[in-house]
Amino acid sequence: MDLTLAQRDRLPDALRALVAEFPRDAWDAHPNYSQLIAFWLDKHLSFRRLTKMLADDTDKALAGLLDPLQYQRHVSRLGGDLINHLHGHHQIEDAHYFPVMATLDQAAAAGFDILDRDHHAMDGLLNGLATDANAVLQRQLTDKNGLTTATSTFQNTLTDFTRMLDRHLVDEEELVVPVLLKYAPEQFR
């Protein structure tokens, strides 16, 4: 099974044992469900919302339903938020959360290695997203063809990025939350 972010459609079954023990639909009712878990899941939801808003605005811009200047402002604000918050989120996970969680459950440790590799892959994807967003932002509003071409390229990059981001977020949630529910480490309460 190819476990790279671009190729996998889920984590291997061996790494999904805890999510089978702690199914997603029962997480918030578990006694070890904490404010940290709620905050962390909400952060993931915010990334999904930002990509959806960017995609919706891009569709509207390409259909001529959103003023080009307004579209550029949205790309700047929403794209900047997405990129900056994802970088920060991944840095905290890699430096603080994942190393501790990997020691709590030996069977899940390989999953944290996969998630760490995802973060490195996401760095490249975020750079590509930023490059294509900047191409939209640098187009003169009078260059309608150039702006449309840059917007179409950004749309394609965003679509691929969103697919891989969602794959990563789902896999991360299905590994991290069950570990936190099972072990309730004191430092993450």
Image (tube, helix red, strand yellow):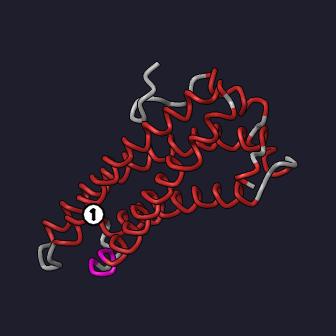
Mark 1 belongs to which amino acid?
Ala
Q: Considering only vertical position in the picture, is 1 above or below 86?
A: above
Residue occupied by mark 1: 133
At 18% from the left and 60% from the top, the residue drawn is 149
The front one of 113 and 6 is 113
Residue 161 location (% of width, % of height): 38, 48
Relative side of 90 to 185, left or right: left
Label 1: how many Cα within 10 Å (few below 14, some 14–19, many 20+): many
The answer to if 120 sits in the magenta stretch is no
Residue 185 location (% of width, % of height): 75, 46
Q: Considering only vertical position in the picture, is 75 above or below 20?
A: below
Relative side of 116 to 177, left or right: left
Relative side of 173 to 74, left or right: right
Relative side of 17 to 115, left or right: right
Q: Secondary structure at mark 1?
A: helix
At 63% from the left and 21% from the top, the residue drawn is 14
Quadrant hosting residue 183: top right
Quadrant hosting residue 7: top left
Q: Considering only vertical position in the picture, is 123 above or below 57?
A: above
At 34% from the left and 70% from the top, the residue drawn is 75
Residue 113 location (% of width, % of height): 50, 32
Residue 112 location (% of width, % of height): 55, 35
Q: Which residues are magenta?
A: 68-72
At 51% from the left and 59% from the top, the residue drawn is 47
